[in-house]
Image: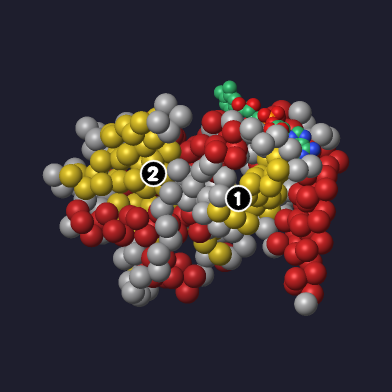
Amino acid sequence: MAKDILVYVLHYDGAFNKNSLGAVSEGGRLAGELGGECHAIVVGDKSGLPDELCATVGKWGASKVFRVEAPEGLAQPVVDAMAHVISENGHGYALFGGGLLGFEIGAGLCARLDAGVTMEVTSVAVEDGKLVAERPILQDSSISRSRYKSDVGVIIGRLNAFEAAEGDGGSAEVVDVDVQISDYSTHAKMVQRGEQRGADVNIEDADILVAGGRGLGKAESFKLCEDLAEALGGAVAATRAVVDAGWYPYAAQIGQTGKSVAPKLYLAAGISGAIQHKVGMQGSENIVAINKDSNAPIFEFADLGIIGDLNKVLPKLTEAVKAKKAS
Ligand SMILES: Cc1cc2nc3c(=O)[nH]c(=O)nc-3n(C[C@H](O)[C@H](O)[C@H](O)COP(=O)(O)OP(=O)(O)OC[C@H]3O[C@@H](n4cnc5c(N)ncnc54)[C@H](O)[C@@H]3O)c2cc1C
């Protein structure tokens, strides 16, 4: 298998996504061990991807960045672009940081290249000159290891599984590539890019998350979480129970069928701590739980537990944070 690794780097509003930069760091490390090179690919309107910005991915470990002018934010044009670059340059692996777009592009790329894929990868090792992808299975109780038989192996990380570590790599060489985007890849059009309620701050990048569960009692009570998140400079997350109830948008759902996050602080209010929720937030550095039931399972893995009524505790916390900031 070839030893070079191609990493997709997502950008928005003139900045690269932290999760993608984590994948570049991991790609750089792995390519170094394999004796190959790590390259990045960026897709979008060239005016939003100036040379100076593109070259910065070198700091995270890519020696070269392929820039493709094509519609951004949609999966199919990126599949076309990556398939073209891989076929022309003979990369052995494609690596993604995760997230919904990464899953969609990665899946399309495997179909296009007849490649093997492993999703939700939390760690990658080099064995006998090849990559081995590891992913937790059976609700994270076991680890499955995947080796690739295909010419190209696709690895899609679990969100934030790879740490973005700035190295001393310097500038990456920027290479413009003309790609013929297929007709069928342009059928979907980006009509509008906007923010959902509760998603003003990207929850995957936020250092602080205030998560609300069914214990909030009603949709309107999310205001308590929003107020505290605003005071702390964080974002709001939710359990599936409240998303299913229509109290909060799916974009904020954490867990097995939602997002995986690893903030510095995860404050869970009115959340029981079901295993399907836990798998999406157990990587948080500090977990604080507010629950009126002292036997709630969340207290088994919380770093700090507050037994009490969230309707009383949340406003008091918000008040205290504001007062501390003002002093
Ligand atoms: C296949 C599958 C996939 C799933 N995927 C996910 C997923 O991705 N994410 C996810 O979150 N769930 C998921 N679930 C659902 C999961 O099993 C739980 O049902 C869900 O997480 C429970 O949400 P909750 O904690 O908000 O609600 P509950 O379990 O109802 O807990 C509410 C908690 O609030 C407390 N409470 C009540 N009133 C107050 C108050 N006034 N003050 C303080 N505390 C109070 C209660 O004591 C209780 O502990 C999945 C389930 C299945 C079967």
Quarter holding the C terminus is: bottom right
The secondary element bearing badge 2 is classed as: loop
- Judged from the image, the quadrant occupied by ligand 1 is top right
Q: Closer to the N terminus: mark 2 or mark 1? A: 2
Residue behind mark 1: 304
User: Which image quarter: residue 142?
Assistant: top left
Instruction: Where is residue 15? Give x, y as percent.
Output: 56, 64
Which residue is nearer to you in this view: 218 or 31? 218
Query: Where is 252 relative to 25, above or below?
Result: above
The secondary element bearing badge 1 is classed as: strand
User: Which image quarter: residue 275?
Assistant: top right
Query: Amino acid under label 2?
Result: Thr
Task: Kindly identify the residue that appears in the image at 31 percent across and 59 percent down.
Answer: 28
Residue behind mark 2: 122
Instruction: Where is residue 104? Give x, y as percent.
Output: 50, 37
Label 2 crowding class (10 Å Cα cut-off): few <14, some 14-19, many 20+? some
| Cα distance in 3D space between marks 2 and 1 | 26 Å
Residue 40 appears anywhere in the view: no
